[in-house]
Image (spheres, grey):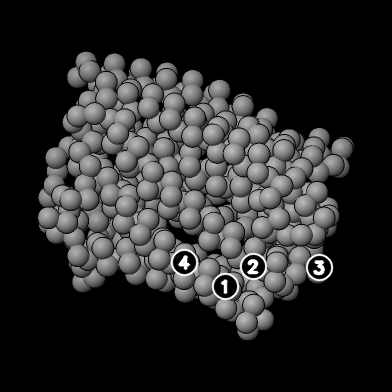
Amino acid sequence: MSSKRNQIDMLNGSLLDKIVLFALPLAATSVLQQLFNAADLAVVGRFASSTAMAAVGSNSSLVSLLLSLFMGLSLGSNVLIATYIGRGHREEINEAVHSTMGIALVCGMIVFCLGMFLARPLLHLMSAPEDVIDLAALYLRIYFFAVPFIMIYNFGSAVLRSKGDSKRPLIAMTIGGVLNVILNLILVIVFKLHVIGVAVATVVSNVVSAGLVWYFLAKEEDEFKLSLRKIRIRKEHLLTTLRVGLPAGLQGTVFSLSNVVIQSSVNSFGSIAVAGNTAAQNFDFIDFCVINSFVQAGVTFTSQNFAARKFDRCKKVFRIVFGVGISSGIVLCLLIMLLRGQLIQLFTKDPEVIVYAMTRITTTLSVHFLIGTYEISGGCLRGMGKSVTPMLISILGTCAFRLIWVFTVVSAHHEFRTLMMVYPISWVLTGCVMTTAYLLTRRKLFTALAEN
């Protein structure tokens, strides 16, 4: 049956091969998603102008801010369904699937409405350069038509991942992303629509990806089958989703808020710096996508095994995702560093833009793998239902610290490299605290549950 063919048994047998089998399609999905987003920048940067490129790039932190709270809820849905699988409560899974998709639809409409009304005021608040703000606001308003479909794709993918299916979300993302690139080229190069073209392409591609994920769920058999008429949000499912997902969403929102402040600081260096920072940021995102695939594996595998009270397997899951995830990040960082000269020219030929891009790459990407120390530890904590602790640590370590750095050190030494140094320092601090918190919480929790 479809449901069984695309499912991974996380509770029995070997773990390394299953974790890698789960993580690789997820990494490919995330990397492709980022590459397709990067295609927006590359097309406008090469075939429109640096101003158009800055207009698209200046929205990245703001979009993340508006989406983060609700995207964190999809993690709660993943844990909710994975827990039912681990406990063997098969009868609860189908209702949880329909609650999850109901939450996705509601969240999508909320963010869409907020984005349409707040687009330009928020760009003003971020001190977006005057020469790009009109184009940036136009891009953002069109982009928000895609948000309901982004929610459907991500929540639907969370449902599929909860049972180990990370391949079909990759298929949906690949088809939608290829369409995005084709439309970018046609609308920008042929029809000269600059930021309008890439925004419309983004909307259409997300409609297609969301439609495919919905189709996969609608064709599922037994407990994972999705039916439009059965969608409703059950209170107990919403509360469980909020308990795990809301702290993750709040963490992401505060994290994005700190990045908005950093983006505002980047804006103070002018549109050339914005364009260079945006181009280089794509490589950080790609490395994050690879590491985050093992974070998601840690969440899902830990959720199922913790629910089944297989504590030794939970420990092994952590060792595998921590070791393989960070090692993968190191390899990718080294590869990008070696090829950085050629890679950055995919986005721009402007020598001034390239200088800023290279500054960010050499400052942040060389140690970017360090994010795995806190992301993976925090993910495994969430898999055990402990979502508040990683939220608080991340807010203090990667958010509060960065704000303090911007308003003190950068204010005193207004240099682009000084601003970029906030990232590696915060990664080291947060990683040490989060890993320690995971180990202490795990020992306390497993001991208490073993005695019951």
User: Which amino acid, by three-letter code, is at mark 3?
Assistant: Glu
Which one is nearer the viewer's eye here, 168 or 419?
A: 168
Residue depicted at 73% across the width and 60% down the height:
348
Work out whether 271 lies above or below 369.
below
Residue contact between numbered discs 2 and 3, judged by CB atoms under 8 Å: no
Residue depicted at 23% across the width and 36% down the height:
10
Which quarter of the figure is the N terminus placed in?
bottom left
Say what secondary structure mark 4 lies in: helix
User: Which amino acid, by three-letter code, is at mark 4?
Assistant: Val
Determine whether, in the image, residue 147 is placed left or right of residue 189: left
Q: Which residue is mark 4?
A: 178
Q: Which residue is mark 2?
A: 43
Dot 3 or dot 4, earlier in sequence: 3
Dot 4 or dot 1, earlier in sequence: 4
Q: Which residue is mark 1?
A: 184
Q: Which residue is mark 3?
A: 130
> What crowding class fits label 2: few (fewer than 14 Cα within 10 Å), some (14-19), or many (20 or more)?
many
- Whole-number angstrom distance, CA of label 2 to CA of label 3: 22 Å
Name which quarter of the figure residue 63 lies in: bottom right
User: Which amino acid, by three-letter code, is at mark 1?
Assistant: Asn
Say what secondary structure mark 3 lies in: loop
